[in-house]
Structures are given as C-alpha cells and as structure tokens.
C-alpha cells in the first residue's frame, strides 16, 4: 500500500483570489508594507509563521491570523477559489487505483480544508485528512507526522504531492519522497531537494506517475 498525500493551496485549488484580498486587508491593518507580487509567498505556509517573521512577535502574529481568519471565513472569501483543471480526475483516479490510499496534508485549517473538499465535491476521494490545528500541529512536518502516526505507517510508505518548498522540506524532514507540482505557487527554479522524485507539469502527470510507480497492477 502506498499513501499519497496532496497539499491543498496551490496543488488542489487555486485559492489566490480569496486569500490575496484578505492578506492585503490584514497587512494594511498591521501597517505591513508587502508588495503584491510577494503575496504568493504567503499562500501555503502556516500564516502564524509568516506573520511572526513580519511582526517579530508570536502573540501579535496569532492576533493577525485571527483577524485574517475572521474575514476569510466570515466574508466567505474562502469560496473564492477553484479546482485546477484536471485535479478532480487526478484525485478520483488515484483514489480508485489498487494499492493506493489518498490523503490531504495541508497547512490550511483542518475544518476549512474539510469544508472545501466537500464544496468541490472531492471529499469522497480522500481517505484521510490532516490539516492545521493551531498550537497542536502547524508545520508541514507536524501535519504529515500526525497523518502517518494516525495511519500507523512509515514515511517510506508515503509520498507528498505539493507545490512549494514547504511541502518538499516537510516531507524531507520525515524521510518522505515528494512529487513537485509545477502549476501552483512554488519557486520551482530554486527547489532541488533530493527527495523530489518527480516534477509534474499537470495533474495528469501525477496520475500517470502514481499509476506507473506505486499502484498495484492486476
């Protein structure tokens, strides 16, 4: 059995529109001068880490995150997103492969990820979900660690599918391979980690790679 964990923002869904709008309002509230062209860097990683770096204070960072979350969910900006072309079939096809268990491991809040997977009508193709829980698991390493511990498997049984260095490094710290998705928010030219076993240009590439390398063919 191989366990394939998909990231959410930038891998399953293009969440830029809704996140960017609320990021700008949060940056403005805390007098943070962040260029619009840098907003991609804040989509995917734990917001608490990003705001800690920007504000220099962990408590202030959590306050900023709470402000962001209040707007993001309260004003339904969370739904200003869409599945990338081909992702629906990728998740469905991988889920139906013999010898494959599908999961989502994301730094999006656990309940938000669950809600959006249902909104996009793909939750039935996800066998297990591990999302961010503040003060419990926030880094990609911790989120993946929680998932594999819950399943009782080893990192070598698993593959992370994601679009940023945070996905790659989170998997790498656990000794897990990673498929790098080139359609999201990553700085791809600067990602050369040895645990990247494949660079996928499209969701169809992911499906083909998983089928040829991990699925049980009967």
Image (cartoon, helix red, strand yellow):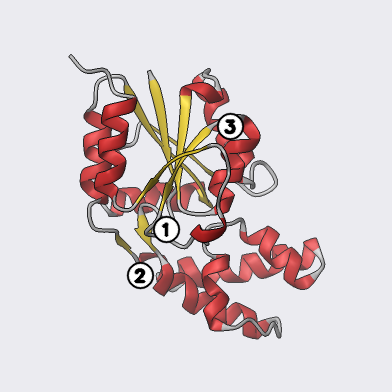
Quarter of the image where one finds residue 80: bottom left
Of badges 1 and 3, nearer the viewer stands 1
Of badges 1 and 2, nearer the viewer stands 1
Residue depicted at 61% across the width and 44% down the height: 169
Furthest toward the right, the residue is 57
N-term mark: 2 or 3: 2
Residue 72: give x, y in percent of width and height: 49, 69
| Number of numbered discs overlaid on the protein picture | 3
Label 1 neighbourhood size at 10 Å, few (<14), some (14-19), many (20+)? many
Q: Left or right: where does residue 36 sit relative to residue 119?
A: right
Q: Does dot 3 land on a helix, a strand or a loop?
A: helix
The residue to which callout 3 is attached is: 146
Alpha carbon separation for disc pair 1 and 3:
21 Å
Alpha carbon separation for disc pair 1 and 2:
14 Å
Q: Does dot 2 land on a helix, a strand or a loop?
A: loop
Q: Which mark is residue 80?
A: 2
Q: Does dot 1 land on a helix, a strand or a loop?
A: loop
The residue to which callout 1 is attached is: 10
N-term mark: 1 or 3: 1
**Visible residue check, residue 171:** yes
N-term mark: 1 or 2: 1
Q: Circles 2 and 3: CB distance less than 8 Å?
A: no
């Amino acid at each position: 059995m191989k366990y394939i964990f998909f990231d959410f923002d930038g891998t399953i869904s293009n969440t830029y529109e809704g996140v960017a709008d609320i990021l700008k309002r949060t940056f403005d509230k805390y007098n943070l001068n962040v260029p619009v062209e840098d907003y991609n860097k804040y989509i995917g990683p734990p917001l608490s880490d990003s705001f800690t770096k920007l504000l220099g204070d962990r408590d202030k960072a959590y306050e900023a995150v709470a402000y962001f979350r209040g707007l993001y969910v309260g004003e339904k900006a969370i739904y200003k997103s869409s599945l990338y072309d081909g992702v629906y079939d990728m998740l469905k096809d991988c889920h139906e492969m013999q010898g494959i268990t599908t999961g989502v491991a994301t730094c999006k809040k656990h309940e938000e990820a669950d809600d959006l997977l249902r909104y996009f009508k793909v939750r039935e193709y996800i066998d297990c979900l591990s999302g961010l829980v503040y003060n419990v698991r926030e880094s990609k390493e911790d989120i993946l660690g929680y998932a594999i511990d819950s399943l009782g498997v080893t990192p070598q049984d698993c593959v992370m599918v994601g679009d940023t260095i945070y996905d790659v490094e989170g998997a790498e710290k656990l000794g897990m391979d990673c498929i790098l998705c080139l359609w999201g928010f990553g700085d791809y030219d600067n990602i050369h980690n040895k645990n990247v076993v494949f660079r996928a240009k499209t969701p169809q590439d992911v499906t083909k790679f998983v089928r040829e390398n991990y699925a049980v063919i009967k």
